[in-house]
Image: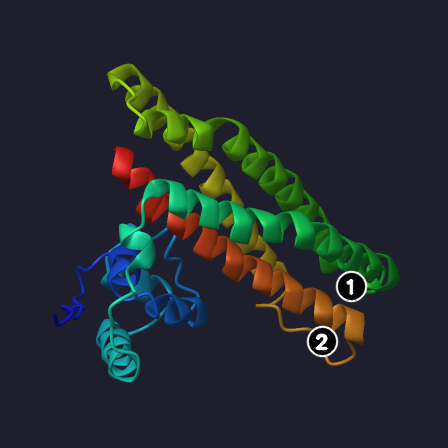
């Protein structure tokens, strides 16, 4: 059976474009368009906020679609059962954070101590990253201890009260996602879009690269929760 191909319009929500055409997430990352926390915006609005022409963005999305047509299987997380999606989030995204955040912290600390006196923005980078690290680790632990088990319990036959409690918890989780997104935006600003200065050493450059990877992984992580998992219960 043929897969229905997405249609991109100025009023299409950014998050819906990614849900229909997952490859668009790579394009939006490149254009610095937030498709997770800020994904509930029309494409026209998101493009204009970045100084982009809507028609150009739409044309480039269709060009990308020609190279990467939607195939059967591309909707795996849209249609996957919640337990399977949750397992993916835990084993890919939560595991990534637990493994990578301490390593990135070592790089951030070293760069700040060595170069911070000559580059004051590294002090702000150090502060923002450590705030983000603490919040993300606390957030993921709470999800695994409380919200994800609550979803599993509800799937087994929860009542209206259990559903209402889930919805309340999702509001809080989405607020935490927004806070993380705001810190990531500030990190990108203070690092000049993760462009290290010409004199930067290898550790300096590696630190910026790992922070940018963290941003991309967090966007994907939040997208799976905000745009796919949570709406199933709202």
Please report the residue visible at 65 percent of the width from the left and 47 percent of the height from the top. Answer: 98
Left or right side of 27 for 198: right
Residue 16 placement (x, y as % from top left): 25, 56
Please report the residue visible at 40 percent of the width from the left and 58 percent of the height from the top. Answer: 34
Displayed quadrant of residue 45:
bottom left
Element carrying mark 2 = loop
Q: What label does residue 197 carry, if any?
A: 2
Residue 233 placement (x, y as % from top left): 27, 33
Element carrying mark 1 = loop
The one of 199 and 104 positioned closer to us in this rendering: 104
The one of 210 and 31 positioned closer to us in this rendering: 210
Please report the residue visible at 59 percent of the width from the left and 64 percent of the height from the top. Answer: 212
Residue 169 placement (x, y as % from top left): 40, 27
Mark 2 or mark 1, earlier in chain: 1
Where does label 1 land, which residue? 119
Distance from disc 2 to disc 1, alpha carbons, whole Å, reads: 10 Å
């Amino acid at each position: 059976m043929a897969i229905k191909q997405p249609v991109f319009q100025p009023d299409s929500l950014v998050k819906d474009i990614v849900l229909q055409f997952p490859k668009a997430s790579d394009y939006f990352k490149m254009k610095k368009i937030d498709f997770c926390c800020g994904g509930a915006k029309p494409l026209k609005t998101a493009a204009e906020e970045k100084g982009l022409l809507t028609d150009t963005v739409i044309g480039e999305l269709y060009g990308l679609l020609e190279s990467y047509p939607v195939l059967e299987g591309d909707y795996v997380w849209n249609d996957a059962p919640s337990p399977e999606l949750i397992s993916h989030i835990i084993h890919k995204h939560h595991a990534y954070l637990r493994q990578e955040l301490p390593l990135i912290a070592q790089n951030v600390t070293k760069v700040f101590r060595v170069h911070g006196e000559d580059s004051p923005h590294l002090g702000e980078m150090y502060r923002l990253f450590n705030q983000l690290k603490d919040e993300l680790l606390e957030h993921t632990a709470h999800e695994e201890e409380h919200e994800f088990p609550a979803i599993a319990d509800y799937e087994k036959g929860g009542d209206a009260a259990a559903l209402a409690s889930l919805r309340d918890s999702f509001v809080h989780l989405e607020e935490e996602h927004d806070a993380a997104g705001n810190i990531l935006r500030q990190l990108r600003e203070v690092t000049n879009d993760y462009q290290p200065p010409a004199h930067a050493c290898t550790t300096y450059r590696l630190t910026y690269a790992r922070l940018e990877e963290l941003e991309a992984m967090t966007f994907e992580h939040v997208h799976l929760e905000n745009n796919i998992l949570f709406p199933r219960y709202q």
